[in-house]
Image (spheres, rainbow, N blue to C red):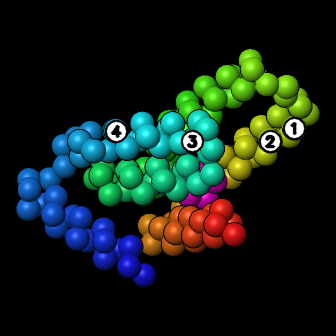
Amino acid sequence: MPVPGLSARVARRHEATGGLPARGARWVWPLMFACGVYGGYFGAAQGVLMMAIMGIGIDETLQRLNGLKNVPAVLVNGVSGVLFALVADVDWLIVVLIGGGAIVGGVLGASIGRRLPAAVLRGFIVVVGVAALITLLT
């Protein structure tokens, strides 16, 4: 799987340049902003994009980054949800069903994600990202 090789190359580059700053590479935050704009409008694979950006640009474990990604994702989805509720006709039954599913998925995902080895979590993220890409392109 090529992703661990990419991680190793990025880690070597960070070591050669003195390591990453505590808040990650400078390009992380503008890309996270762009990801937020994308997620607010479209949302598909937003978490995978955030994990890719943070995984390369922030020196932290995937498990911690997976938890961290939930904070901007909640903000993006919350802001876009409020805006949609203000300007669109909303089917609130669907909102309740999706919200309930998100809560269950978040609790299960957090408990499972913390226990998975980094390689398994990385593989799962890649599989979900590729599946989303294939679904979007077909």
Which residue is the site of mark 1? 94
What amino acid does circle 4 point to? Pro
Amino acid type of the residue tagged 2 in the rendering: Ile
Q: Earlier in the sequence, mark 4 or mark 2?
A: 4
Q: Position of residue 43 (x, y in %)?
A: 62, 45
Q: CA distance from mark 4 to mark 1?
A: 33 Å
Q: Is residue 65 magenta?
A: no
- Percent x, y of residue 34: 43, 40
The relative height of residue 101 versus residue 55 in the rendered view (above or below) is above
In the structure shown, which secondary structural element does the residue marked by tag 1 occupy? helix
| Distance from Cα at disc 4 to Cα at disc 3 | 14 Å
Q: Which residue is mark 2?
A: 98
Q: Nearer the viewer, mark 4 or mark 1?
A: 4
Tags 3 and 1 in contact by the CB under 8 Å rule?
no
Tag 2 secondary structure:
helix
The circle drawn on residue 39 is 3
Mark 3 vs mark 1, CA separation in Å = 19 Å
For image coordinates 51% across by 36% down, the residue present is 37
Mark sitting earlier along the chain (4/1) = 4
Circle 3/circle 2 CB separation < 8 Å? no
- Kindly check if marks 1 and 2 are in contact, taking CB atoms under 8 A apart as contact: yes
Give the amino acid type for the residue marked by disc 1 in the picture: Ile
Sequence order check, earlier mark of 4 and 3: 4
Residue 115 at least partly seen: yes
Residue indicated by mark 4: 30
Nearest to N terminus: mark 3 or mark 1: 3
Residue occupying the point 56% across, 58% down: 113
Where does the N terminus fall, quadrant-wise?
Answer: bottom left
Q: Main secondary structure of the magenta part?
A: helix
**Residue found at the very far bottom of the displayed protein:** 1
* Mark 3, secondary structure of its residue: helix
